[in-house]
Every structure is written in structure tokens, then in C-alpha cells.
Image (cartoon, rainbow, N blue to C red):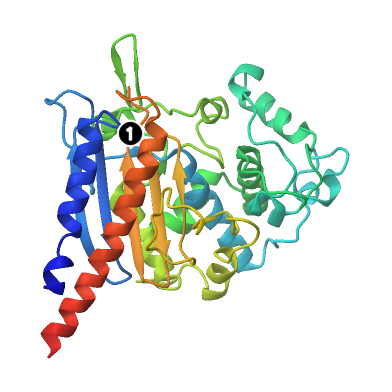
């Protein structure tokens, strides 16, 4: 009886995602659930658009505009690599790498402050309205005054990630997109992950909106990333669910890849350790006071992130579990408050994933008898 009760997670995932599509939360989605050793579940749902003639998204090939997942799939691992190499320290002052970052109180802001979102910078600036070139936009961010004293509060900020991206470029001597491609994605086998998409793959990109009745595909949703030239520490990355699952497995496997070690176990531990509130370094930690996004069954050690376009990824080292759930929630949603509904769907999928893992473990023990 117990085994039968635990065999319900897969139908529950289908029910939750398909119900959200029928209700107009998003037109399409992909889900991947796995462990450090294997993928337990991988499926695409709905369509690229609300048209039933549009393609069904595929976990292996459909490219999603990751939005703020860029922070933890590009920027944070880039910083992790530099810290591992010893070419950058968490205590490095931002002004020592980016001299234009100056102003009252800004001289004490460190790389750690940026990662933990305790720098004192506001969360957002409309750079696409304030600047006409990437250089002008960069200058505005560098000259932005602090809104709070560093380390006095946690304030999630796109500006922190932008600065981290520029720090990576200054320290590495190359562009952010080149660095992560060469140092991370090639080694990880993440062949579909990239900043910017060429017209040749536009038919594989999940659309992010409509403009005068025309589907917008292959153009970034985040207009600040567009103003910054398409490559930024806060947004701009495209990837598939399969590539993200591969990345998550590397972190669950303590940084090891087929050719060696991509991240040291030490640096993974440091970056995924809870700092203040629900933040670690770059990553978000599971909020144990709420079921939004992560449900109630993931452990307090679970870390992950989400993106405005409807993307999310959660990794639980205690359970040895990964959950990748990608949607194009911003494509003409047919329900008000789509982001709130999406958080509920994410929570239900996370709980179903934990139950799926329990069922697999129980069945394995029964088979061994």
C-alpha cells in the first residue's frame, strides 16, 4: 500500500503543470528531476506559444531566456572559479578592481558583499531608459551611490551581479561570455548554454512576448541586459533544461567532471552556505518559513535561484536532488498574478520531486530483499 502511495509523484507533476497551462499561467514548460548520478524524470509540456500548432518544448534542445538564473549559471560560477584559482578573494574591495566604483561609503564594499546582496546598492535601475550605450550604462551603475550602509541589510540587487560580471572580466582579462564558455561550459559539457542566440537557432528559443501580434523569439526579455550589449552578470544567458541539470549534477558531485575537477569541494561549500536571511553567496537558500517556490519537503540546505521569465533551478545536497523547471511565463499570460501562481506550481513540483526520490529509494530497498 505504501509503495502504491509513493508512485504518484509523476502523475502529480503532469497534473500540476498541465493545469497551469490550461489556466493560462504559461504556454509551455520543461521539467527535469534527478540526482547526482541519474535523471529520474524529463519531460516537455504545452507549446512554445498558445497556439496548439506551435512546437512542444523539449528538455534537450529548447533554449530558454534564463533571466536572473544567469546570476548563478554564469556569474557566480565564474567568481567561484577565480576564487578557486586564487586570482580573486571574497574580501577583495570592489574599488580595487573597478576604480570608478567610488563614492561615500563605497570604499568598504567587497566581492562578498556583492554576492550576498549586502552591498547597500538598490535593487534596480532602468538603464535602458537612462543610457543610450553600454558604456554609458556601465558608468551609471559604477557611480550609483549606496542606499544603505554595507552589511546593514539584505537587498537583492541586479546591480551587484552587473558589478561581479565586470570584476570577472577585469580579473580574467577576457569577456564574461568568453570566460564562462571556456572555463565552465566546455568542461561541463553544457554545449547549448550561451549568451546570445544566432538566427539559426531562433526556432529552438522559447518566445518571451508578443509585439503587435508578432512572436518575439531570440531577443532578450531583460532590457537592461540589452542595453549592456546582451552580456551581463545579471541576465542574458540562454540554456536548455538538460544543460542546467548537468550543471546541477556537477555541484551535487562536489565539483567533479569527467576530465577532473571544475570546482573544489571547499569553494562549493563556501558559496552554498547560508549567510544572512535566505542568501548564500550568489545563490538563494530555501526559505523554511514559506512553501513558495520550494514546497515543504526540500531540506534547509537546498539552494537555487529563479528568473523573471519563469525559470528556476533548485539543488538539494542533503537529499541528493535537483529540480529544473523552465517556463516562458512572460509570454502573454492569460491569468492575472501569473508569478504568484507560478510559485505555487514550483512548490508542488519540488514536493513531487522529493516524493519521487523517496519512492525510488523505497523500491530499491524492497528490490534488494
Count residues near mark 1 (Cα–Cα under 10 Å), then give few for <14, some for 14-19, many for 20+: many
User: Mark 1 — residue?
Assistant: 328
Q: Is residue 44 among what the camera can see?
A: yes
| Residue drawn at (32%, 48%) of the image | 325
Location of residue 129 in the rendering, given as x and y in whole percent from the top left corner:
61, 17
Location of residue 240 in the rendering, given as x and y in whole percent from the top left corner:
31, 46
Local secondary structure at mark 1: loop
In the depicted structure, whether residue 343 falls above or below residue 212 = below
Residue nearest the viewer, comparing 288 with 257: 288
Name which quarter of the figure residue 245 lies in.
bottom left
Q: Is residue 190 among what the camera can see?
A: no
Location of residue 64 in the rendering, given as x and y in whole percent from the top left corner:
34, 38
| Residue drawn at (17%, 80%) of the image | 364
Q: Residue furthest front?
A: 1
Left or right, residue 7 beside residue 88: left
In the depicted structure, whether residue 72 falls above or below residue 163 = below
Name which quarter of the figure residue 232 lies in.
top right
| Residue drawn at (26%, 50%) of the image | 31
Q: Residue furthest top?
A: 212
In the depicted structure, whether residue 88 falls above or below residue 210 = below
Residue nearest the viewer, comparing 192 with 114: 114
Left or right, residue 217 beside residue 227: left
**Which quadrant does the N terminus fall into?**
bottom left
Location of residue 217 in the rendering, given as x and y in whole percent from the top left corner:
32, 25
**Which quadrant does the C terminus fall into?**
bottom left
Left or right, residue 282 beside residue 212: right
Amino acid at each position: 500500500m505504501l509503495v502504491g502511495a509513493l508512485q504518484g509523484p509523476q502523475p502529480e507533476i503532469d497534473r500540476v503543470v498541465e493545469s497551469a497551462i490550461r489556466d493560462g499561467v504559461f504556454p509551455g514548460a520543461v521539467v527535469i528531476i534527478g540526482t547526482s548520478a541519474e535523471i529520474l524524470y524529463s519531460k516537455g509540456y504545452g507549446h512554445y506559444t498558445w497556439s496548439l500548432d506551435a512546437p512542444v518544448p523539449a528538455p534537450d534542445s529548447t533554449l530558454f531566456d534564463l533571466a536572473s538564473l544567469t546570476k548563478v549559471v554564469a556569474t557566480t560560477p565564474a567568481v567561484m572559479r577565480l576564487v578557486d584559482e586564487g586570482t580573486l578573494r571574497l574580501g577583495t574591495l570592489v574599488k580595487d578592481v573597478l576604480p570608478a566604483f567610488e563614492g561615500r561609503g563605497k570604499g568598504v564594499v567587497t566581492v562578498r558583499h556583492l554576492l550576498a546582496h549586502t552591498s547597500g546598492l538598490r535593487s534596480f535601475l532602468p538603464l535602458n531608459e537612462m543610457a543610450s550605450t553600454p558604456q554609458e550604462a556601465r558608468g551609471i551603475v559604477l557611480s550609483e551611490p549606496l542606499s544603505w550602509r554595507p552589511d546593514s541589510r539584505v537587498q537583492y540587487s541586479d546591480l551587484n551581479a552587473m558589478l561581479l560580471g565586470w570584476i570577472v572580466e577585469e580579473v580574467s582579462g577576457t569577456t564574461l561570455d568568453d570566460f564562462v564558455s571556456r572555463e565552465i561550459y566546455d568542461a561541463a559539457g553544457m554545449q547549448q548554454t550561451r549568451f546570445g542566440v544566432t538566427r539559426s537557432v531562433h526556432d529552438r528559443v522559447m518566445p518571451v512576448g508578443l509585439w503587435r501580434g508578432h512572436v518575439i523569439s531570440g531577443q532578450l526579455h531583460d532590457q537592461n541586459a540589452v542595453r549592456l550589449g546582451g552580456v551581463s552578470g545579471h541576465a542574458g544567458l540562454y540554456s536548455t533544461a538538460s544543460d542546467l541539470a548537468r550543471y546541477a549534477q556537477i555541484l551535487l558531485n562536489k565539483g567533479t567532471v569527467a576530465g577532473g575537477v571544475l570546482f573544489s569541494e571547499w569553494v562549493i561549500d563556501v558559496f552554498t552556505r547560508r549567510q544572512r536571511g535566505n542568501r548564500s553567496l550568489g545563490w538563494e537558500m530555501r526559505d523554511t518559513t514559506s512553501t513558495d517556490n520550494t514546497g515543504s519537503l526540500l531540506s534547509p540546505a537546498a539552494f537555487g535561484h529563479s528568473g523573471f521569465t519563469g525559470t528556476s533551478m533548485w539543488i538539494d545536497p542533503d537529499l541528493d536532488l535537483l529540480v529544473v523547471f523552465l517556463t516562458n511565463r512572460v509570454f502573454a499570460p492569460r491569468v492575472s498574478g501569473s508569478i504568484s501562481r507560478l510559485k505555487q506550481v514550483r512548490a508542488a513540483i519540488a514536493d513531487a520531486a522529493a516524493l519521487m526520490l523517496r519512492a525510488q529509494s523505497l523500491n530499491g530497498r524492497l528490490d534488494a530483499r
